[in-house]
Amino acid sequence: MSLAARHLEEAGIPTVVLGSARDIVEQCGVPRFLFTDFPLGNPCGAPYDAEMQTAVVGMALDLIEHAPFPRTTVQTPFRWRDDAWRVNFMRFDNLSPETLRAMGEERRAQQLARNARLSG
């Protein structure tokens, strides 16, 4: 994503990267970066929080227009609902592939059930 943004900028197309991996994105030297201190995969905000997601996208659009200098990073003011995700980030505790697979299947089942409740 970061390299694509740099390429688009060279072609005259303004970009802003939304992300959670600050060290990686800044190392790549993107022109504008909107950082959310959230678990990976959630750069626009918490799932189902349309108000937060709309605000994050609005901040990104503002950053395209008003970045004060090249390689600008702006951090959103939002916080994840709790910091428990930090404890488990990149943690696997030497679990067997079978255990990890079962955990993934359980998580997917929980997500499907939640989505069914929300849509029904």
Image: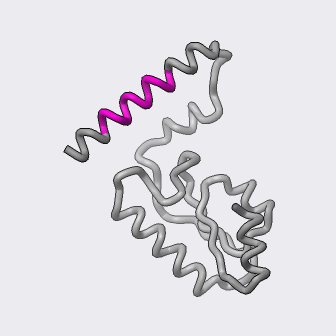
Decide if residue 49 is on the left or right side of residue 60: left
Question: Which of 71/61 is in front?
Answer: 61
Q: Main secondary structure of the magenta part?
A: helix
Image coords of residue 36 (percent x, y): 55, 58
Report the quarter where the C terminus lies.
top left
Image coords of residue 71 (percent x, y): 74, 74
Above/below status of 109 relative to 9: above
Question: Which of 90/101 is in front?
Answer: 101
Residue at the image point whose x is 79% and y is 62% from the top:
28
Image coords of residue 17 (percent x, y): 63, 67
Image quadrant in which you'd find residue 67: bottom right
Magenta region includes residue 12: no
Above/below status of 49 relative to 102: below
Image coords of residue 112 (percent x, y): 35, 35
Residue at the image point whose x is 23% and y is 39% from the top:
117
Image quadrant in which you'd find residue 82: top left
Decide if residue 63 is on the left or right side of residue 116: right
Report the quarter where the N terminus lies.
bottom right
Question: Which of 87/11 is in front?
Answer: 11
Above/below status of 26 relative to 117: below
Q: Which residues are magenta?
A: 103-114
Question: Which of 1/58 is in front?
Answer: 1
Magenta region includes residue 108: yes
